[in-house]
Image: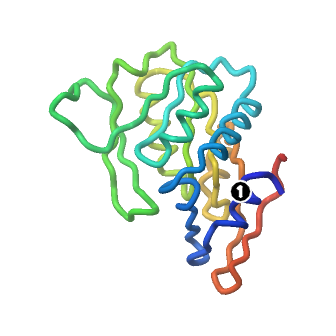
Amino acid sequence: MNFLQERIVKDGIVKSDQVLKVDSFLNHQIDVELMDMMGAEFKKRFYGKPINKILTIEASGIAIACITARYFHVPVVFAKKTQTVVQDDDKYCADVESFTHKCMNHVFVSKKYIQPNDHILIIDDFMAHGQASNGLIQIIEQAGATLEGIGIAIEKGFQGGGDSLRDRGIIVESLAIIDKMDAETGTIEFRNSKN
């Protein structure tokens, strides 16, 4: 079991066979030392890729993206969900369905922050059906930039998003892939992964 799997077993709460609560360390209260370990691991897994930007989506992905960016020495760009009065109208957009919030989000990135010569790593905290990643891929494609891969903290493998992206030839590196959860017993089955 790797460090993230161990933490999920210790502090994660299985709410149902579809929902895992990890807000005590990942997406409400943040364990910065754990985030640092994840950032270092993403750097190892994507070593040698010509990554010059990290892309995520607000809000839960921002913390892990920022810490990962420190290891790559690159900026983080995050897709916004709400328009402000100071926002440019010149932007790339995608519609993203949220598994967690059960709603559709119209996300966007200003065109000045993603250029055709950018080599982008997508980083996010969770992957279920892969909707957020697919939306970010659309934005990268609109910009004519290059997707170098996707790094996910926790992938719910049983929901198929990661495997669907891998079937398209996209490199997806998840630090913990969950194949099954049982709310009655609180047990979690992980797919074999790198340590």
Q: How many labels, in total?
A: 1
Q: Give the image location of residue 85, x and y in percent.
A: 15, 32
Residue at x 42%, y 57% (from the top left corner): 98
Asked where in the image residue 42 lies, by quadrant, the reply is top right
Q: Is residue 111 above or below residue 98?
A: above
Q: Which quarter of the rendered picture does the N terminus lie within?
A: bottom right
Graded by Cα atoms within 10 Å as few (under 14), some (14 to 19) or many (20 or more), the crowding at tag 1 reads: many
Residue 169 visible in the displayed image: no
Q: Give the image location of residue 105, x and y in percent.
A: 33, 51
According to the picture, the residue beneath numbered tag 1 turns out to be 177
Can you name the residue that lies furthest to the top here?
A: 117
Tell me if 18 is positioned left or right of 169 in this view.
left
> Three-letter amino acid code at disc 1?
Ile
Q: Nearer the viewer, residue 125 or 130?
A: 125
Per the image, label 1 sits on a secondary structure element best described as: strand
Q: Is residue 22 above or below residue 116?
A: below
Asked where in the image residue 11 lies, by quadrant, the reply is bottom right
Can you name the residue that lies furthest to the left here?
A: 85
Q: Which colour scheme is used?
A: rainbow
Residue at x 22%, y 39% (from the top left corner): 83
Tell me if 174 is positioned left or right of 124 in this view.
right
Q: Is residue 32 above or below residue 53?
A: below
Q: Give the image location of residue 147, x and y in percent.
A: 57, 28
Q: Give the image location of residue 41, x and y in percent.
A: 73, 37
Q: Which of 169 and 98 is in front in this view?
A: 98
Q: Which of 171 and 33 is in front in this view?
A: 33
Residue at x 65%, y 43% (from the top left corner): 33
Residue 10 visible in the displayed image: yes
